[in-house]
Image: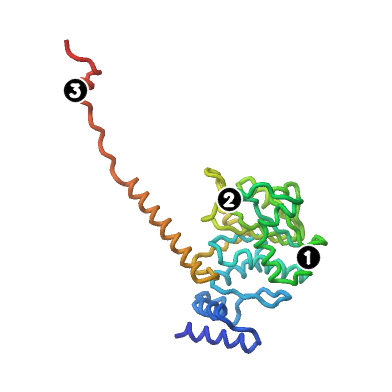
Amino acid sequence: MEAAQGAINGLYAKLQRGEAVGPSEVDAAIRMAEIEDPRLPLSDLPAIRTKRGAIGPRSPGQATYMDLLARHEMVFALGPAGTGKTYLAVAQAVAMLTAGKVDRIVLSRPAVEAGERLGFLPGDLKEKVDPYLRPLYDALHDMMPGDQVTRRMGTGEIEVAPLAFMRGRTLAHAFVILDEAQNTTPVQMKMFLTRMGEGTRMVIAGDLSQVDLPAGTRSGMRDALETVEGVPGIAIARFDKRDVVRHPLVARIVEAYDQRTAAEGDTARRRRAQPQPDAVAPTGPAAVGGQTGK
């Protein structure tokens, strides 16, 4: 009852502010009404303010993530597709750029095909990398007018920096986003993390269930999480299927894959736990070296 009342009150507050309320807003209000963190009441949820308007959380996981983005210089965002890891990072980057808190936004992503061979891509460096960075561009265009995105890219305020070409650089007074970080190698990840300069924020986003590296290659994101977790100044936001805010089917698809993975793990553990049959001692001539009596 309290959750329902909280959801209705949240939607009514949106209407009072002149904001539109549709199915996605209703879904978000229901999710947020179930939040149990006393630091984040519905009336005081974090918001990222851009020139296109305020962007608020649509799940408890997003609320925690937005709080971490505001308070920490480096944030790892880990979880399934559709949870807003990249979108909210871009929103925070745009808000800080337009407020003058950083001088530029740097977007990076490893150029790894998702199970496909894309072959030779024509054009200059930017044109070759653009297909991999399209989700970041889409988020940028949601945050600011297209002509402003184009102008800021022309002046270098928004920069596309292919991961392979970042070695040797120091990124100062920037908001740097590494997307699809699960597809970095440990060497690439260490190189990226150590590019951080004065006044810089970094977000490393990825999904360890969608690693597209060659078989046997360890994910740099997994390696980094095991190495730097607990280091002061670094925060880790973990999302799960409850935070998926795309089409409701996406959450059910993620859950189905998780259940299958868990079942396969249980089956493998049961097989390992089964006692192996004792070796049968050889009998007959083989028992005496294969020689026959004279």
- Please state if 5 lies on the left or on the right of 146 as rendered: left
Q: Which residue is mark 1?
A: 150
- Could you tell me which quadrant the C terminus lies in? top left
Q: Are marks 1 and 3 in contact (CB under 8 Å)?
A: no
Q: Any mark on residue 185, and which?
A: none
Q: Residues within 10 Å of mark 1 (few under 14, many from 20)?
A: few
Q: Between 117 and 48, which is closer to the camera in this rendering?
A: 117
Q: Which residue is mark 2?
A: 116
Which three-letter amino acid code belongs to the residue tagged 1? Thr
Residue at 53% of width from left, 64% of height from top?
239
**Looking at the picture, does residue 206 appear above or below residue 70?**
above
Q: Secondary structure at mark 3?
A: helix
Q: Which residue is mark 3?
A: 284
Spatial CA distance of label 3 from label 2 is 57 Å
Q: For residue 10, what is the image quadrant?
A: bottom right
**Looking at the picture, does residue 10 appear above or below residue 48?**
below
**Looking at the picture, does residue 187 appear above or below residue 33?**
above
Q: Are marks 3 and 2 in contact (CB under 8 Å)?
A: no
Q: Residues within 10 Å of mark 3 (few under 14, many from 20)?
A: few
Residue 12 location (% of width, % of height)? 58, 88
Which three-letter amino acid code belongs to the residue tagged 2? Glu
Residue 246 location (% of width, % of height)? 55, 70
Residue 235 location (% of width, % of height)? 60, 61
Q: Secondary structure at mark 2?
A: loop
- Please state if 288 lies on the left or on the right of 14 as rendered: left
Which three-letter amino acid code belongs to the residue tagged 3? Gly
Spatial CA distance of label 1 from label 3 is 85 Å
Q: Which tag is nearer the camera, tag 1 or tag 3?
A: 1
Residue at 56% of width from left, 66% of height from top?
82
Residue at 29% of width from left, 40% of height from top?
276
Spatial CA distance of label 2 from label 1 is 30 Å
